[in-house]
Image (cartoon, rainbow, N blue to C red):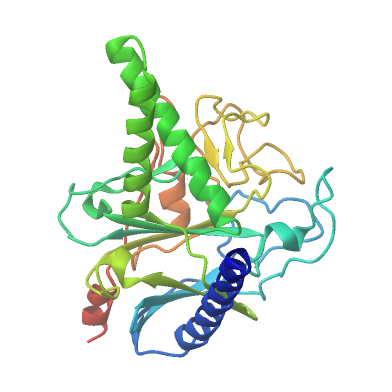
Amino acid sequence: MHRYGATRALILAALAAALFIAVGAVALAGDGPEVFRLADPRGDDHGDGSLIYPQRDDIEKGELDILSFSASADKAGTVFEVVFAKPVRKPDRRTIDELGNTLDSLARLGFYNFNVDIYIDTDRIPGSGSTVMLPGRRATIDPAFAWEKAICLTPRPALAAGGLRSLLERQRKLELKSRQGRVTDEDEKQIATTVAKDVAADIFFPTLVWVTGNRVRFFVPASFLGGVAQDSWGYVVADSVADLQASVDLGSALGGDPRAPALMIVPVGRGRGAAFLGGGYEDDNLEPPLVDIIVPTGVKQENVLKDYDLRVDRPVKLPGVVPADLKSLKK
């Protein structure tokens, strides 16, 4: 009898949780007051001007072309929206690997072709924060927009978060080993705990997502951002082609730097192919695989993404945009 009661309690709890999620999703999907909207030119989904979409029949030019990025206030946080030039392609039931996994079983959020990275400078103090982007982006953030919070909208958020934690744990173990010669079991536990806290505090992978036509909306709780997103903050926004199969790729067979890991992102390669962005240069480990970015008024995306130096290993620096500054320019 006790065993039956426990099972019944679990079932009721699961149903209650499902109902809460469903009701919450409906509520959060409602339109709240818009905080800001950033526009981006049509037809610039080519990175530095040379990038070519992977040669596949399920992705084509325009699908990663960002037209706008906006934020709307919600009682529980912020609903961000990205509008693309073409409708978002939704996952279907085709088998995509030797294990028999279907596309829609892996990409459960209603999209699968892209990642959207957002790096937010909340304190607006130059140099205060991080300039490091997620692995594989081959770019950094301009120190004037060093970020405190990052958001990664990706088709498989749990896999991405786990891959990032694994990568950071590996890096910190190597650093500790170089200092003290060995890493104990206790050290490993402490590193895992610290990394998990750091990732949870600094980087958010949305799981509440709505896809309608060419629009993708996703929720970020106030507990992560410290409130509703502000138009006085600085925003770096970049998208890329998503790699569903690997959370962290520690090397690249396409000429990439084997020392540089990549998180859920399709790399750049020479020529054209199905597994990479074409148009890459030979022996170039710094060309970013970023398809579209939002840049400040008067700045050309192509110039930003070309501005790196292989001779001194200097990567691209992405500038941020402060929506409130744009509003003041229009007055």
Query: Residue at the location (66% across, 50% down)?
Result: 244
Figure disc tally: 0
Quarter location, residue 266: top right
Q: Quadrant of the N terminus?
A: bottom right
Point out the image quarter for the C terminus.
Answer: bottom left
Estimate the x, y position of residue 288 in percent, counting from the top left.
51, 44
| Whether residue 196 is situated above or below residue 152 in the rendered picture | above
Note whether residue 314 is visible: no
**Residue 124 vertical position relative to residue 80 in the rendered view, above or below:** above
Q: Is 265 situated left or right of 221 in this image?
A: right
Q: Residue furthest left?
A: 125
Q: Residue at x 48, y 54 (%)?
A: 302
- Please say whether residue 188 is visible from this viewpoint: yes
Residue 139, above or below 60? above
Q: Nearer the viewer, residue 294 or 258?
A: 258
- In the picture as drawn, the residue positioned furthest to the front comes out as 1
Q: Residue at x 23, y 48 (%)?
A: 129
Residue 95 at what x, y percent from top left? 84, 54
**Residue depicted at 57% across the width and 49% down the height:** 159
Above or below, 141 relative to 65: above
Q: From the viewer's perspective, is 132 left or right of 324?
A: right
Where residue 70 appears, x then y in whole percent?
41, 77
- Image spot of residue 65 (x, y percent): 58, 67
